[in-house]
Image (cartoon, rainbow, N blue to C red):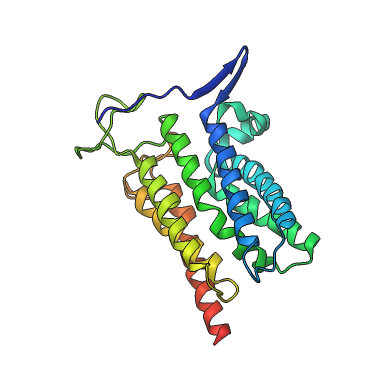
Amino acid sequence: MTYPDIDPVALSLGPVKIHWYGVLYLVAFASAWWLGRYRARQPNSGWQVEQVEDLIFYGALGVVLGGRIGYVLFYNFTAFLDNPLMLFTVWQGGMSFHGGLLGVMLAIGFYARKQQRGYFEVLDFVAPLVPLGLGAGRIGNFINAELWGKVSDLPWAMVFPGGGPEPRHPSMLYEFFLEGVVLFLIIWFYSGKPRPALAVSGLFGACYGLFRILVEFVRMPDAHIGYLAGGWLTKGMLLSLPMVVIGVGMMLYAYRKKA
């Protein structure tokens, strides 16, 4: 297939350029805001719309700060030691899901304390709001022609700018489908009924970690890191495996405690 080669700049206003990647981040936050308000309006939700709006604000800060710090520390730590100011060069790109996840978890801690709510009560409420935003971010990766996969002869393989002349897996679209669409459907419908505390968050972590690991088998690792071992183990796998283990453990604990 032919890569559509979309201009990553959505709108230019003189010297100011608005990139699709930034627009899609706004789409991610807007989707979480809308879904959170929808859930808060359901009978016996225990949430008010105003509380959701504050929660999304805290979560957005956690995503942006955690995502940037996580990318620098997880994927560019050596360069960071040489130039600590690179942490602030956000215009050069670089965000990490795992860093964003840690940032959101920390932000939820501040929010839960402020609202005098249980930490895992808030975490379970937030989990279903996240996948659509993850999907939007992967569309941004596709528009930027970044994070492409290994060489492939499949009918939907594409030749990406910067990826050489050979067609490759559109791995960012795989992630859009699994981490965005499939994960959303699983978590949204599972959380539509009362579940024991920790179960929704645990299912999110286990499913995301599994989906990410699967895609990592066909996704090219960061060029400056490469494979960690065996010509197949990537940093993304290493960061995602604990999510699977901890997520499954959380669900087991949740249902055993309920029983």
Above or below: residue 176 compared with residue 148 = below
Q: Toward which corner of the image does residue 166 lie, by quadrant? A: top left
Above or below: residue 147 compared with residue 98 = above
Could you tell me which residue is drawn at 57 percent across and 27 percent down? 92
Tell me residue 189's x, y (percent).
Answer: 47, 65
| Residue farthest along the bottom direction in this orientation | 259
Q: Toward which corner of the image does residue 118 lie, by quadrant? A: bottom right
Residue 77 in sight: no
Residue 160 relative to residue 122: left or right: left
Tell me residue 108's x, y (percent).
Answer: 69, 57
Residue 252 relative to residue 89: left or right: left
Out of 102 and 110, give the one closest to the viewer: 110
Residue 198 in sight: yes
The quadrant of the picture occupied by the C terminus is bottom right
Tell me residue 244's x, y (percent).
Answer: 46, 63
Tell me residue 23's x, y (percent).
Answer: 56, 33
Residue 124 relative to residue 169: left or right: right
